[in-house]
Every structure is written in structure tokens, then in C-alpha cells.
Image: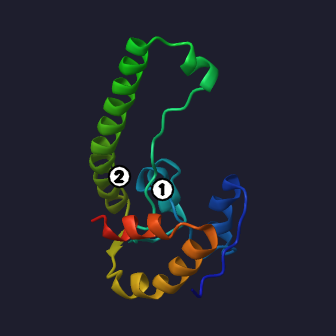
Amino acid sequence: MGANAAPMAFGEVYTSLQTGVLDGFEHASAVVYTGKYYEVAKYVTLTGHLFGPTVTVMSKKEWDGYTDKEKQVVAAAAKLAQDVNRSLSVQRDAESLDKLKAKGMIVNPIDKTGLVKAALPLQDQLAKTLGADDLLITIRETK
């Protein structure tokens, strides 16, 4: 899609931006703020291309050791944590963007229509390769 990705250790991103090795990088606005990337980058573009899920993970052995009641409690707590995290994520992102603007960064929303259209053939190809046609349909139907 025309990008030239440059994989590197995250600890090298700041100095790579500072020295011009990188033109940009992608991350959540809170990371941009707390990492002080506003010192070496001028623009934030709101692509909305990532969703960072929060998951609860435990071993099957541990899970199988729980009673049915304990499993219900743990599952309910995990769902509550997910819901709280997702609702706070929107608020924290907005707060971080405000802080970045206050530090002088220019925040640019973009029209993703062309990008979404251009990605369709690649999505189709990947879904076919991975046997995930049904999943892709579900994703595309989700708004």
C-alpha cells in the first residue's frame, strides 16, 4: 500500500524520529504523550487503524480447577474489566490528544474512505489464504 515499514526495537523509535531515520510511527496518543514524542514529531494523524483489545488469560489447568460458581465470577469480572477499560480508553485517548495539542502537536483527522477501499482486495486475499472468509464477512458487517 505504498508504505515502507522499518521494524525496530521500540526503545529506538524516539531517537530515530529525532535523527530523521523514521518519518513517523504509530501508537496510541497516551504513549505518544508519556513518551514525549511531541518533542521529536509535529503531527498526529487519526487513522483509527488499530484496536487494542484487553484480554484475560489463564492456564487451562487453573481454569479447570475452579468450581462452576468460581468460573462464573471470574468470567463476570473479566467482562466488567473489559467494559470499564473500553469506556475509559475513549476518555483517556481524548485527554491525551488534548495534552498533545497543548504541547504543540497538530492533530489531523483523515478521510479513510480511499484507504478502506484500497484495502478490500488485500483483505479478501488474506481471508482466503487463512480460511477466514466468514470472519471477514462478520468484521465487515460490524459497525
**Residue 109 versus residue 85 in the image, above or below:** below
Q: Are marks 1 and 2 in contact (CB under 8 Å)?
A: yes
Q: Determine which quarter of the picture holds residue 51.
A: bottom left
x 71%, y 66%: residue: 7
x 38%, y 88%: residue: 114
Label 2 environment density (alpha carbons within 10 Å; few <14, some 14–19, many ≥20): some
Q: Position of residue 110 (x, y in %)?
A: 34, 79
**Residue 122 versus residue 143 in the image, above or below:** below
Q: Which mark is residue 96?
A: 2
Q: Earlier in the sequence, mark 1 or mark 2?
A: 1
Q: Determine which quarter of the picture holds residue 138.
A: bottom left
Foreground pick, 23 / 64:
64
Q: Amino acid at mark 1?
A: Val
Q: Which residue is mark 1?
A: 32
Q: Which mark is residue 71?
A: none
Foreground pick, 16 / 26:
26
Q: Secondary structure at mark 1?
A: helix
Q: Is residue 124 left or right of residue 29?
A: right
Question: How many angstroms separate mark 1 from mark 2 (CA)?
Answer: 8 Å
